[in-house]
């Protein structure tokens, strides 16, 4: 474990199919998986649409060679960009990995001409809200609605 305030050296790259098990384990460790969302289906869906916008972070410190330390799934529909599944391994949080993943997602979306990024944070998750606020994200006066078209569970 690195000292508080330290920055981890990571390599960001597109997700590869061999990352699947590690990414799902990461999402579970970070509390991102819900019974109504099958993470394997979410990965397969993302691989079919803009797979280059699905990022993973690998540590460069030698202590986790080949291990996935973080992930971010982004998308752009021509109107807005979205970021989903931003996750950093619990033992590597607060090392700027999440910040690096968001910066790369923003760079990739901006290169596509994306004017604004939206993301969703579960209500009550104050730590994550504070993280995004530090990155310049602000609450929009909106209500998120959803409708499941294909049930996962």
Image (tube, rainbow, N blue to C red):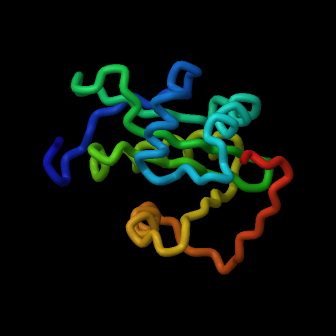
Of all residues shown, which one is farthest toward the left?
Answer: 3
Image coords of residue 96 (percent x, y): 32, 48
Q: Quadrant of the N terminus?
A: top left
Residue at (44% x, 31% y) in the render: 12
Q: Residue at x 52, y 66 (%)?
A: 137
Q: Residue furthest front?
A: 153
Question: Residue 37: horizontal and vertical position, in percent?
Answer: 66, 49
Horizontal arrangement in the rendering, residue 38 relative to residue 130 (left or right): right
Relative depth, front residue between 91 and 102: 91
Q: Is residue 103 visible?
A: no
- Total marks placed: 0
**10 relative to 104, above or below:** above
Rendered residue at 45%/37% (across/down): 25
Horizontally, residue 48 falls left or right of residue 103, namely right
* Vertical order, 95 against 135 (above or below): above
Picture residue at 78% right of the left edge, 55% below the top: 79
From the top left corner, tell me how far across and down residue 70 is, in percent.
42, 39
The location of residue 131, given as percent across then percent down, is 40, 63
């Amino acid at each position: 474990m690195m000292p508080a305030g330290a920055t981890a050296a990571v390599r960001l790259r597109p997700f590869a199919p061999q990352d699947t098990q590690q990414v799902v384990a990461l999402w579970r460790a970070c509390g991102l998986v819900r019974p109504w969302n099958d993470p394997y289906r979410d990965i397969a869906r993302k691989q079919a649409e803009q797979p280059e916008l699905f990022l993973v972070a690998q540590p460069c410190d030698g202590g986790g060679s080949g291990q996935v330390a973080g992930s971010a799934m982004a998308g752009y529909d021509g109107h807005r960009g979205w970021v989903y599944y931003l996750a950093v391994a619990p033992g590597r949080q607060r090392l700027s990995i999440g910040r690096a993943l968001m910066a790369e997602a923003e760079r990739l979306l901006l290169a596509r001409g994306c004017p604004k990024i939206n993301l969703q944070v579960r209500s009550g998750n104050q730590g994550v809200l504070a993280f995004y606020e530090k990155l310049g994200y602000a609450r929009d006066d909106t209500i998120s609605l959803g409708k499941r078209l294909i049930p996962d569970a």
